[in-house]
Image (cartoon, rainbow, N blue to C red):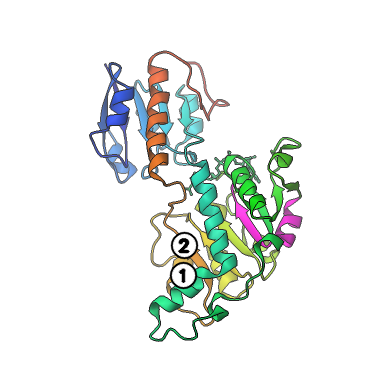
Amino acid sequence: MHRVVITDCLEPPALIEEGNLSGLAQVDCLMAKSSEVLHGQLVDADAIILYHEVDLTDTLLRGLKQCKIIVRGGVGYDNVDVKIAGELGIPVCNVPDYGVDEVADHTIGLMLGCLRGFTLAERRFRQATTLTPWDRHDVGKVSRTGDRTLGIIGCGRIGSATALRAKALKMRVMIYDPYLRPGMEKVCGGERVDLGYLLKESDVVSMHTPLTEETRHLMDAQALSQMKPTAYLINTSRGAVVDTSALAEALRERRIAGAGIDVLPHEPPSLEDPLIQLWQADHDPPINLTITPHTAYYSEAALLEIREKSSAEVARMLRGEAPWNVVNGEWLKQV
Ligand code: NAD
C-alpha cells in the first residue's frame, strides 16, 4: 500500500482523496502551517499533494526517498522547487483548470468595483452617522464601462476567460503576452499590443501571468508611472508580480485612480505592509482600493474540483499511467 501525504489545508477525513485512491494508498493529512514542521514527515511518502501554506524546498525535496509524484492542488506552483524535483526524477503536476471561471469572475468583480465606485460609497455609508447626501457624489467620477479599455497582461486560461467577460461588457480588450501563439488573441476578441502601449492606453490593467523571475515586480514604479492617472490596476495572479510598495505610493499620490487586489507577496500580510496600511487608513478623498484575502479561486465547486483532480492525478501515477499536467518536464530526469 502506498502512502499519500496531503501536507496542508485539508483536515481528515479526506474522503474524496481516499475514494480516488482506494486500494492504492492510505492518505495522511498533516495540516502543516509551515514548511518547518514537515521535516522528517515526508521521507516515506509515495506521493505528495500540497496546497499553499507550505513550500517544498530544496532540503525537503532531497529528503524524499520514494516519492513518485508531487501535485500542487492549484494552478501556481511557485512554492515548489520544480527544478530540483525534476533533477530528482519527481514529476510535479498542478491542477490548471479548476478555478478559471471563479478567478475571471472575481477579476471582473474587482474591476467593476473600481470602475463603478461602489466600494467607495459602501465604505463611507457604512461608517457614516448621517446618510445624506444619498446620491452619486460618493462613488467618484464614473465612466461608462463599455467605453473603457481593459489591458490584460498574460492571456492564458484566466486572462482569456477575463477577456471574454470584458467583451460581454462591451469593453475594448488589449493583450500583452509575448508567449501567446499568433492569432490566439482573436479567440477572445482582443488586440495584441506591446506592454508600453497597453500601460498607456488601458483604463484597467489586469495581471494574469504566473510568478516567474521575469514577471516578479513586472508592475513596478516605472510601469505604474506609465498608466493613466484615471486608470485602475487589478491583480488576481500572484502578489509579487506587483511591487506593492510602489503601488501604495502611486495610490497615495493619486498617480493612478485605484486598485483591486486579491493576492499579496506575503500571505497573510503583515499590518505593516504599506499597501495594507494605506487600505486600512482613512483618506480624504477616499482611495479606491479593494483588497480581498486570496479568494478569487474560491467556490465550493472549485474546491471539490481541485481535490478530485489532484487525487486523480496521483492515482494515475500510482497505477503506472502517465500524469496529465506535468509542469517540470524540462528538468525531469528519468531515474
Ligand atoms: P496560464 O499559464 O494559463 O496563463 C499565464 C499566461 O501568462 C500565459 O499565456 C503566458 O504566456 C503568460 N506569460 C508568461 N510570462 C509572461 C510575461 N512575462 N508577460 C506577459 N505574459 C506572460 O495561467 P492561468 O491559469 O491563467 O493563471 C494565471 C495566474 O493566476 C497565475 O499566476 C496563477 O497562479 C494565478 N491564480 C490565482 C488564483 C487566485 O485565487 N487568486 C487562482 C488560480 C490562479
292 relative to 141 in the view: left or right: left
Q: Which residues are magenta?
A: 194-208
Q: Residue furthest left?
A: 13
Q: Disc number at residue 291?
A: 2
Task: Report which quarter residue 205 is drawn in.
Answer: bottom right
Q: Is residue 206 magenta?
A: yes
Residue sitting at x 67%, y 71%? 229
Q: Is residue 274 above or below residue 110?
A: below
Is residue 237 among the parts visible in the rendering? no
Amino acid carrying mark 2 in the image: Ile
Q: 1 and 143: which one is in front?
A: 143
Find numbered disc 2 in the image and state the secondary structure of the residue it sits on: strand
Amino acid carrying mark 1 in the image: Trp
Residue 11 image point, x, y percent: 25, 39
Residue denoted by label 1 = 279
2 relative to 132 in the view: left or right: left
Q: Is residue 314 above or below residue 164?
A: above
Residue 110 image point, x, y percent: 53, 59
Q: Is residue 206 above or below residue 318?
A: below
Q: 298 and 282: which one is in front?
A: 298
Task: Report which quarter residue 270 is drawn in.
Answer: bottom left
Q: Residues within 10 Å of mark 2 (few under 14, many from 20)?
A: some
Residue sitting at x 50%, y 73%? 120
Residue 231 image point, x, y percent: 65, 66
Quadrant occupied by the N terminus: top left
Q: Is residue 150 magenta?
A: no
Are dots 2 and 1 in contact, CB under 8 Å?
Answer: yes
Assign ligand 1 to one image quadrant: top right
Q: Residue furthest top?
A: 320
Find numbered disc 1 in the image and state the secondary structure of the residue it sits on: helix
Q: What's the distance in space between the residues labelled 2 and 1, CA to CA?
A: 8 Å
